[in-house]
Image: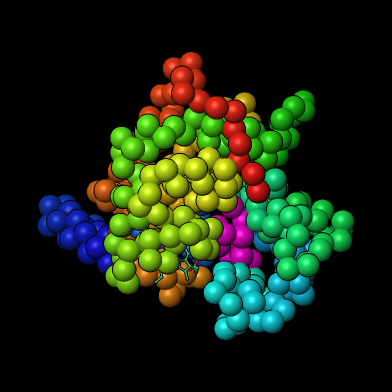
Amino acid sequence: MKTLLSLLLASTLVACVGGIEEPPVNPVPNPLGTPDGDGNDNGDNPAGGDLTAAKQLFDSGVYSTLKAKCTGGACHNETGTGGSVTKFVADDPARGWQIATNYAALVSFYVPTSAPVLTKIANGHEGVEYLPTEVDAITAWLNKELELRNGQPNMPPGGGETLGAAGERVMQEFAGCLNIDDFLAVDFGLKWGNKGSNEGQCEQCHTNGAFRFLANNDNQKMHRRLTKEKYEFLMYFTPDLTNGPAAAKMIVNRPAFYGVAEGLDPHREHPQFNANDDDIAIIALKDLYDRTQARIAGGKVGCLPGALTN
Ligand code: HEC
């Protein structure tokens, strides 16, 4: 609401000066630019690509698999009441892709080797197994999302590293350079654990990493988990592949928070919170990012080999 209000105020002010300002077309401001095309403008389509081809791969080859394998016991279906888990399978197939792509807990920003939709199953989850053809269909869909959202071919012309492999490489490098001294310096745990929402602090629900998001005011624990648990790490940081594999780098994962903060579909019932630049937890996240990048740039002092696992 705060964002909406400040946007409204800002546009009123502009209107007073210029007199020709149009009201915003999108009622919820997309903080990162153009609409995402997936029904939740949280900035997770940085290249602004047309996602139709990815949606088609999901609709034809993935939805039915998720529907068949993940809704047993009413676990992951949208309207299911079973378990305290992520409800990523839409009841209506027409909305299947929109719901699935807006759960970071499921897709983790589309790198096939890191997306829980695949890795969780590979690790043996609830006895669910995919057939090789199903794995291939999910992998092809994820790669297509990655390609379109980053505006880059998955495999560069002439061969070499794929987008997914580059994403994996930079996330391991970055995670290896997350240093406990920096967590303590910015008091990362306290800022995120105690961060408020309209239904209590993040820690109340996420203290142990529920829904793949960890917020705990113990800096040691935050450091330990974010250097090991890939999914939890990926809620805070994500690869930027918009300039191709060779130029891959990590960035702060703002999209992980925007849609959730504003209660955008499918996070309608999530408590609302401030995910903007003036928020002290966001400031601490950027600070931790800058310190980690400085370590990478400065000869990797205080870094270890990346140890993220699925
Ligand atoms: C009252 C409990 C509760 C509180 C408090 C809470 N959350 Fe959540 N959170 C949930 C539930 C339930 C989900 C899974 C459903 C969803 O994704 O909307 C979730 C999911 C998430 C996700 C994963 C979304 C995805 O795309 O998979 C993020 C990120 C997140 N929360 C951030 C936060 C932050 C930041 C705070 C504190 C400002 C917070 N949450 C406070 C209950 C809570």
Q: Which residue lies at the image location 76% right of the left edge and 60% below the top edge?
A: 124
Residue 54 image point, x, y percent:
68, 56
Q: Does 80 appear above or below 229?
A: below
Q: Which residues make up the magenta segment? A: 97-108
Reply yes or no: does residue 76 show up in magenta.
no
- 217 or 272, which lies in front? 217
Q: Choose top left, top right, bottom left or bottom right for residue 84.
A: bottom right
Q: Which quadrant does the N terminus fall into? A: bottom left
User: In the figure, is residue 69 to the left or right of 22?
Assistant: right
Residue 134 in view (yes/no)? yes
Left or right side of 124 for 98: left
Q: How many marks?
A: 0
Q: Quadrant of ligand 1?
A: bottom left
- Residue 22 in view here: no
Answer with left or right where residue 193 lies relative to residue 243: left
Secondary structure predominantly adopted by residues drawn in magenta: helix
The spot of residue 152 in percent (x, y) is 63, 38
The residue furthest left is 16
Taking depth in this image into account, of 273 and 9 the one nearest to the observer is: 273
Was residue 101 drawn as part of the magenta stretch in this picture?
Answer: yes
Image position of 242 with respect to 129: above or below: above
Residue found at x 31% / y 50%: 190
In the image, what residue occupies the spot 72% across and 79% down? 72
Question: Which residue is outermost to the right?
Answer: 132
Residue 261 locus on image (x, y percent): 38, 62
Quadrant of the image occupied by residue 272:
bottom left
Q: Which residue corresponds to the image point at 55% horizontal and 27% vertical from the top-left?
A: 304
Q: What percent of the width, then of the height, locates residue 268? A: 44, 73
